[in-house]
Amino acid sequence: MIIVDELPHHASAIDTLLDRSFGPDRHLKTVYKLRAGVEPVAGLSLVTLAEDGSVIGTIRYWPVLLAGQVPSLMLGPVATSPEWRSRGIGSQLIRRSLNRAAVAGHRSVILVGDAPLYQPFGFVRETVLGLDLPGPVDLQRFLGLELVEGSLTGLCGAVERWDDRAAALAATLAPARSRPLISRVKAARAA
Ligand SMILES: CC(C)(COP(=O)(O)OP(=O)(O)OC[C@H]1O[C@@H](n2cnc3c(N)ncnc32)[C@H](O)[C@@H]1OP(=O)(O)O)[C@@H](O)C(=O)NCCC(=O)NCCS
């Protein structure tokens, strides 16, 4: 199997995989309000392909604006085909894409998901305590990761859908220079 960037022709297989993984009502979730009408972030949204070329894993990221002024990424959904689970595909997609996000100069990532799945990658509840999502969620599942230390600290306000104003704001910011996540994880282990 291989991991490649998501391309337009993967979209329908991804939809099928997401329907199987989350159910057809998935679009009703609060996080979909932040995805509506916005394209997934190219270069971070990845698929895992089986040897026959079929899509067996997907991860997507969306740009979001925090507290009216801070661009960030929202991770999700991530899913592995039921028959391919527990072989490391999900973890590999999360690790690879987070490393790419750090290398690309993104400063932070938020998500709504199962804490036990994301805590090993550094996601914690504390970093997003001041942020509000545009609808109901189980707050224990609302997590954040600072790719640049302090990038979420003290932020208070709404998580908003990406729009032209957010894009214009982001264009004025220089990309962060952070070490790839994997090197920080290794450094932390060595310490
Ligand atoms: C979550 C999911 C993407 C993991 O994919 P996968 O390819 O099986 O992942 P991995 O093989 O890398 O396993 C990752 C680890 O997380 C664990 N895990 C899987 N789903 C989990 C969950 N929902 N909560 C906590 N841990 C979870 C696995 O048991 C595994 O732990 P282990 O290595 O100690 O056995 C897959 O189970 C899936 O598609 N689930 C349905 C959709 C979903 O719930 N997505 C995540 C939303 S938060």
Image (cartoon, helix red, strand yellow):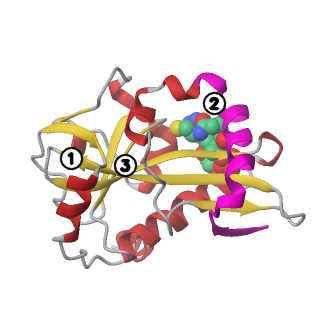
Disc number placed over residue 66 in the picture, else none: 1
Residue indicated by mark 3: 123
Query: Which image quarter has ligand 1?
Result: top right
Helix or strand or loop: what does disc 3 sit on? loop
Per the picture, the main secondary structure of the magenta-coloured stretch is: helix
Give the residue at x 49% y 65%.
42
Contact check, label 1 and label 3, Cβ < 8 Å:
no
**Discs 1/3, front:** 1
Q: Amino acid at mark 3?
A: Phe
Q: Disc 2 to disc 3, how far (Cα)?
A: 21 Å
Q: Amino acid at mark 2?
A: Phe
Q: Is mark 2 within 8 Å of ligand 1?
A: yes
Residue indicated by mark 2: 22
Q: Is residue 93 above or below residue 4?
A: above
Mark 1 and mark 3 lie on one chain; the one further toward the N terminus is 1
Mark 1 and mark 2 lie on one chain; the one further toward the N terminus is 2
- The answer to whether any part of residue 149 appears in the image is no
Q: Is mark 3 within 8 Å of ligand 1?
A: no
